[in-house]
Image (cartoon, coloured by chain):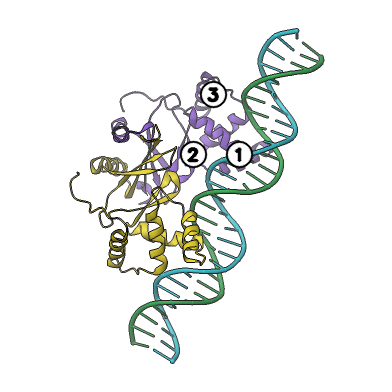
Chain colours: A purple, B yellow, C cyan, D green
Amino acid sequence: MGQHDHHEHHGDSLADAAQANLEKSGEKWTDTRAAIFDTLAGFSRPASAYDIADLVSTARGKRVAPNSVYRILDLFVANNLAMRVESANAYLANSHPGCEHDCIFLVCDTCGEATHVDDDSLSQQVRKVATSEGFKSIRPVIEVRGICQKCN
Amino acid sequence: MGQHDHHEHHGDSLADAAQANLEKSGEKWTDTRAAIFDTLAGFSRPASAYDIADLVSTARGKRVAPNSVYRILDLFVANNLAMRVESANAYLANSHPGCEHDCIFLVCDTCGEATHVDDDSLSQQVRKVATSEGFKSIRPVIEVRGICQKCN
DNA sequence: TCAAAAATGATATGTTGTATCTTAACACGC
DNA sequence: GCGTGTTAAGATACAACATATCATTTTTGA
């Protein structure tokens, strides 16, 4: 394993950890937020806001509008409960909330699955390049598109 | 400067180089393609397909539909005449066509300007991470969002 | 010159994202 | 409990980005 433990969560344990992290920031863990988090966490690949809106609407028998989903996903991203995959216009639940990394996403063009890698040395180098160009408030976007092992 | 010269082009010289590269691949340099390339090259920031469609339509007094623009931008990207900035859903002309790099884009969230950096060591590391995960047909997406020097 | 192929156009529609305003839920002092 | 301010969520509309399909034009080359 890497430099430190990640406490990978799943299922209820993951939702509990997410709730704890969100509340630690003074935000509330509402029913809608819980439902959206659970749905997002149920995906094994990046899910679009509309995917989530549809599933949550069905599951609760009550429409959740896409803009509400976007609002809540933005909140999740801001609090590190979820990440946005830019090259897929979609979102992934963070399976170890509370642990901040610049993630690297490997996204398969065939099956859509995304694997998530941390390489702090690499992301630090990216930050360094940006810093040396005078950038502030840096947010690296490091992704790889390709064909995954299973699809080869 | 870096490991090799880039022959940075601009204006007609750039268009000429782009034309040469496209024709080298057996593709034609049509009027529409030339107009779209010129318009794209005239932007100092990533331009959306619709931006380009509007400008080209006005400039030529003849409507160019967005789907045509997408088609041609895809062709440009495939032939390294242009690059897509994933985190901006937009495109940039390659100012040194013929020279293949995994580009790193630094995009300012304030002014929208993008600067383009090459760091082969960095992109090779990203490719290596993906390779070690069993990925093939690798296309790295390395971008940084932040606030540029001028906007600070 | 004619037929096939390539490029572009027209049109429609699908997908992703935001803006604005309204309503509902909640929290807290009185 | 009762009003009041604040936060969360809903409704609606629309803007922005992207693709699918089929028609038309242009180019090419036998």
- Picture residue at 36% right of the left edge, 23% below the top: A5
Would you place residue A99 above or below residue B94 in this image? above
Q: Position of residue B49 (x, y in %)?
A: 47, 55
Name the subunit of mark 2.
A
Q: Amino acid at mark 3?
A: Gln
Q: Residues within 10 Å of mark 2 (few under 14, many from 20)?
A: many
Residue bearing mark 1: A67
Would you place residue A110 above or below residue B38 in this image? above
Would you place residue A6 above or below residue B100 in this image? above
Out of A57 and A42, give the one closest to the viewer.
Answer: A57
Out of A86 and C10, give the one closest to the viewer.
Answer: C10
Q: Amino acid at mark 1?
A: Asn
Q: Position of residue D17 (x, y in %)?
A: 49, 50
Indicate the secondary structure of the residue bearing disc 3: helix
Residue bearing mark 3: A19
Q: Amino acid at mark 2?
A: Tyr
Q: Position of residue A33 (x, y in %)?
A: 59, 30
- Picture residue at 40% right of the left edge, 43% below the top: B113
- Say which mark, if any, is on residue A91: 2
- Say which mark, if any, is on residue A81: none
